[in-house]
Image (cartoon, rainbow, N blue to C red):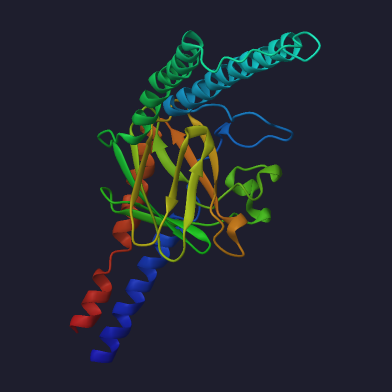
Amino acid sequence: MRFANILSGLAAATTSALLSTAAFAGDGITGLQVVGGPTAGGTGFQTAGSELARDQQWLDGWLLYLCIGVVALVVVMLLVVIVRFNQRANPTPARFTHNTPLEIVWTLVPVLILVTLGSFSLPVLFKQLEMPKADVAIKVTGNQWFWSYEYPDLGISFDSLKLDKDKLAENGYSDDEYLLAADNAVIVPVHKNIVVQVTASDVIHGWFVPALSVQHSAVPGRIGEVWFNAEKEGIYFGQCTTLCGKDHAYMPIVVKAVSQQVYDDWVAKNKKAADLGTPAAIKMAASN
């Protein structure tokens, strides 16, 4: 009788686990437009899908113009020196060693440039580093060579692996999204603060979603935090950015931003699957 009870309990546990796994065999959310992803021949930023991304892309462009202005000023000054103070135009060089007004100018101008640079860049950087109150919290764990995700407040967890080429269509991806698509995506609601805790189980990985401007090293034994607020419904592709072994190139990241209703339905479905996968049957078998 004891042996029969153990077999029965293990069978129930196995069935529950299989049902739970089946529920996570694809997120079931298709038909979304790709918002953030690489494009053939592209050299610029991906479409910004969050306030952080818009701020950082604006800052990058603004600093580029600032750098162009500084370089232009230096080039003009060099040309003036070359033309006016060469040996032919100025055969008798001056012998003075100091020019107080000039020294004040070339000290103050760089200081003003640095102050201007800091006044625009520091608020953008601080916004990225200051964690808001989380509407949704997600824990990300890097593994060789896949990602594990956990929604600790919801009791939902799953692994995310590269999607095989022959399964792209049935999961709503096109053929050119091979190596970008994953079997299970991170599902988040739009216009909500998503706080992501990043760590790793073996070696250092890198969790990076360019269009959302979130990137953090996944370091074993440490937990880092990033956050984002997706402004557009759609698919955001990312990749592992730290060389982590032979399959480093095969650790895609997929974030799907959906409406609140779709997100709530996804949570309800997968919480039910998580409940089916509880270890109650295993505990029952052990108690017998």
Q: Nearer the viewer, residue 276 or 168?
A: 168
The image quadrant that residue 135 belongs to is top left
Of residue 255 and residue 31, the one placed in the foreground of this image is: 255
**Is 145 left or right of 166, judged from the image as shown?**
left
At a point 64% along the width and 28% down the height, the residue shown is 44
Q: In the image, residue 282 lies at what x, y percent?
A: 27, 75
Q: Position of residue 206 (x, y in %)?
A: 49, 51
- Which quadrant would the C terminus be assigned to in this image? bottom left
> Which of the two residues, 45 or 195, is positioned nearer the viewer here?
45
Left/right of residue 133 with respect to residue 176 in the rendered view:
left
Identify the residue shown where x is 72% and y is 11%: 92
Measuring from the top left, give residue 142's x and y in whole percent.
45, 58
Left or right of 52 on screen, residue 135: left
Residue 280 vertical placement versus 54 (above, below): below
Reply above or below: 51 against 151.
Answer: above
Q: Residue drawn 22% across and 75% down?
A: 283
> Which residue is outermost to the right?
88
| Rendered view: 16 above or below 165 | below
Tally of numbered tags: 0
Residue 235 seen in this snapshot: yes
Asked which quadrant contains residue 52, the reply is top left
* Residue 267 found in image quarter: top left
Q: Residue at x 39, y 43 (%)?
A: 266
The percent coordinates of residue 245 (x first, y second) are 57, 64
- Please identify the quadrant where the N terminus is shown: bottom left
Residue 28 visible in the snapshot: no
